[in-house]
Image: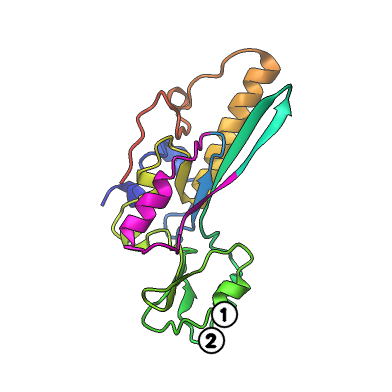
Amino acid sequence: MSSEYGFDRFHLGEERASRITLKSSTPKYSMKVNIERCIGCMSCEVSCKKEHNLPVGPRRMRVIQVGPYFIKKGQLKTVYLPMNCFHCDDAACVKACPTGSMQKRADGIVFNDPNTCIGCKSCIHACPFGSPQFNEATGKVTKCDYCKHRVDVGLLPACVTLCSTDALWFGNINRISTIDREKTARKLTEHLFGFVAPNPSQMGTSNVNDTDNEVKVG
């Protein structure tokens, strides 16, 4: 198994990684979307449907288009936002499920067990984000589970591996948070002090999804 579930794309120095999450603790997984990079190519949707053999209709990953709208002097802008399940800590879908088929794992992944799902759609009505989808072909509910069958063997979710612009990040939530803060600090340094901060890889800190660095996926 590759290091930390295949997430060697997050290049943190050993001494820094040890300060993020205790080695004995259960990792909490999260997915971050960089909407500045998303171009609406739908690769994530296609890879997800193929990975889970979904028919026309249900989409575990959905790319929402906002716009086009005018921003200034005739210039148009369109924003694309990939939306999958948010894997809420206090998941409404889990509470609403009468059979217990909707469950939450210790690592934060919310999933539906098709063996006990009766297709009552209670979870669909309970979720404020529209994540659970009804699969007419099976008569059961399907939803994003971060491709747990892949994560459990050290791979990344299918949508992350095929994102053409590297707009999707997945991994330990504490790690992603640290990377976010370091990238923000780098931008602020450039803005406030007028010089380009060193590349994080040269500083022994984290870098992720930088176009000038190799990105490894599962």
Contact between marks 2 and 1 (CB within 8 A): the answer is: yes
Residue 47: percent from left, percent from top: 35, 51
Q: Residue at x 64, y 66 (%)?
A: 128
Identify which amino acid the numbered label 2 is placed on.
Pro
Residue 210: percent from left, percent from top: 45, 29
Residue 218: percent from left, percent from top: 30, 46
Q: Residue at x 61, y 74 (%)?
A: 125
Element type where label 1 sits in the image:
helix
Res. 98 mark: 2
- Towards the viewer: 115 or 31: 115
- Towards the viewer: 42 or 182: 42
The residue that mark 1 highlights is: 122
Compared to 110, does 41 lie above or below? above
Residue 157 visible? The answer is no
Compared to 156, does 207 lie above or below? above
Q: Residue at x 53, y 62 (%)?
A: 87
Left or right position of 176 against 117:
right
Residue 129: percent from left, percent from top: 60, 62
